[in-house]
Amino acid sequence: MASSTVKLDELISQEYKHGFFTSVETDTVPRGLSEDVIRLISAKKGEPDFLLEWRLKAYRHWLTMAEPHWATVHHPAIDYQDITYYSAPKSRQDGPKSLDEVDPELLRTYEKLGVPLEERALLAGVAVDAVFDSVSVATTFKDKLAGLGIIFCSFSEAVREHPELVRQYLGSVVPYTDNFFASLNSAVFSDGSFCYIPPGVRCPMELSTYFRINARNTGQFERTLIIADKGAYVSYLEGCTAPMRDENQLHAAVVELIALEDAQIKYATVQNWYPGDKEGHGGIYNFVTKRGDCRGANSKISWTQVETGSAITWKYPSVILQGDNAVGEFYSVALTNHYQQADTGTKMIHLGKNTRSTILSKGISAGHGSNAYRGLVKVAKSAVGARNYTQCDSLLLGDRCAAHTFPYIEVKNPTARVEHEASTSRIGEDQLFYCQSRGIAPEDAVSMIVSGFCKEVFKELPMEFAVEAQKLLGVSLEGSIG
Amino acid sequence: MLDIRNLHVSINDKPILRGIDLTVRAGEVHAIMGPNGSGKSTLAHVLAGHEGYTVTAGEVRYLGRNLLELSPELRAREGIFLAFQYPVEIPGVANIYLLKAAVNALRQHRGEPELDAVDFLALVKDKLKLMGMDTDLLYRSVNEGFSGGEKKRNEILQMAVLEPRLALLDETDSGLDIDALKVVAGGVNAMRSPERAMVLVTHYQRLLNYIVPDQVHVLAQGRIALSGGRELALELENRGYGWVEAAAGPAGGGA
């Protein structure tokens, strides 16, 4: 059956289609990291003292830490002095006031990705805060949102315009001491997105940010902070894809979500960064800290992620369930192909009474890909009546890939109910032949099977994102009939 | 319609078929019988294009074309259908979704527009009734958690929806109780037509009580040892396969 194994390999080894390079001038700080570099970044951005102090504290703490190696991923040592910690497109210096003023080269980049910014914004009713490298260059629908009291802007702008909110919430979910990469991010973060929904306001549109890494050898350190005040609702979409390159790039973002009483935040990600070539060279290192805090009673935070890119993915979007009756959800599809590695999962920390959490993780491994689910469900003594349901499914394509599941469960309250289910299956030659014998081409059969496997997670994505996820996995989604 | 000449097939260098000659015309129903390991299922799989087998000699013409150079999906689109002995489970993929993808792949091949959801559903529900199946079976994952009988019915349902020109039924009767056997046979009989040919692969004569074949062939040691009419099947039931095998000569005999 060797011939059919080869065929399966061909199907899963299609090269990254979004590989290209945009020649936008950039304004770059010299390589390496020191207090001087941090001061320079802070000064370039005209930050208030409290933020510079915070960065420096983070940096000093980071110096005492060691790079973690407990994940089931392998990579050559990262030289943190060989990274450029700040780069901004030069054309930004005068600050574009509208899309017309945005570098046309940049707009073409988005078009190549099949995401025309203006069309997308208009047709889909999505407000787009486009992050190109480290600085936001275009923000739309701002006025409409402002009318509702919603603040949706770049992180730098939030620092300038709303320093009190930044000061109050920054680091309150992910402290600068949290972990090696979060500390690094806290010291050097360049920009990101900020969102505040005032009490009782339901954000009328999906908020969306397109991240893109584009400057050579520039680590990207995004910082996202989303606050839903009492009774507020927001759905936030993050998506990205990056140009082809041959050097490893470090991406260490931090995302903090805060949901106060009765508030709800839905955060969806489609991540398609350059995964490296077929031999495993190049590709993005995606070491991200994402955490939400259900701070108030009856609050809810949902993470949905579709991870298909990056050479290495290391991330655990988590929820701290502080408020009574708070709900945390994590829906994930992670696909690894060629030599990609993913160690991803979630943490659900139950503190409040009757808190509930759901974890649904779908890992797909192909080629030499390695996929690990790592999840922690922790029920504190105080969490009377807490409930968790976890389901982890792995799908294997071919016979050289790997899937691992590491569930950690800590329960300190006897009234808690925690369920865990796991399964591993494989797309077999027999399944492909069965589909072929019904007239279906093998590549369509693979798409169909993968899509079926991911169905439950895709259901959780907003419509337009589900379409992108579908594109990304090269699948035709199920559920179109019946 | 189907013309097999001196077909030799091996799997991992082990010869399974050692020179099959068989002609099937439109409108005919042929039964391939034989003891276990005689190569019946291999023949069905080779005709459907399974890549685990190597054709070492001979040729197969289908509607005047060289069948062996076609991929399995092209064979299906050209009207060949294999009802599996062991239908494969595909978790997460709804039965109806597979059916729709198959129907549209065939229609596209014929240059016809895709069926819309309403027409498609009407078509499927019609065939569903024929097979005495519940609608909810359409929305379950392909063959997952199906009983043996449900799986076999599902195969015939697919056949009824796809309307092949040449249907290959591999041990469709195995694992069926008598009631299920009648339903499946009824579905198959309803599809008999002057334009369509069928090849039934079966170990037992029982199925042939319900689907009466035009010709019966007995496979032994990778060759057709004996051909005849309906009565050959009955004789096999009485006498077993031993005498045919003895007549066919020792295994490993030259081709």
Image (cartoon, coloured by chain):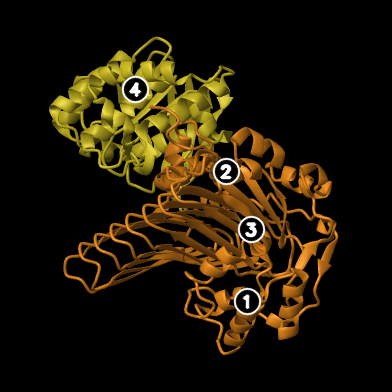
Chain colours: A orange, B yellow
Q: Nearer the viewer, mark 4 or mark 2?
A: 2
Label 1 sits on residue: A50
The residue nearer to you, when weighing A164 against B104, is A164
At mark 1, the secondary structure is helix
Left or right of B158? Residue A353 is: left
- Same chain for mark 1 and mark 4? The answer is no
Q: Nearer the viewer, mark 1 or mark 2?
A: 1
Amino acid at pointer 1: Phe
At mark 2, the secondary structure is helix
Q: In the rendered image, which quarter contains the C terminus of chain B?
A: top left
Q: On what subunit does the disc labeled 3 rest?
A: A
Label 4 sits on residue: B30
Which image quarter: residue B168? Answer: top left
Q: Do the residues labelled 4 and 3 touch (CB within 8 Å)?
A: no
Label 2 sits on residue: A468
Relative vertical location of residue A395 with respect to residue A379 in this rendering, above or below: above
Label 3 sits on residue: A273
Amino acid at pointer 2: Glu
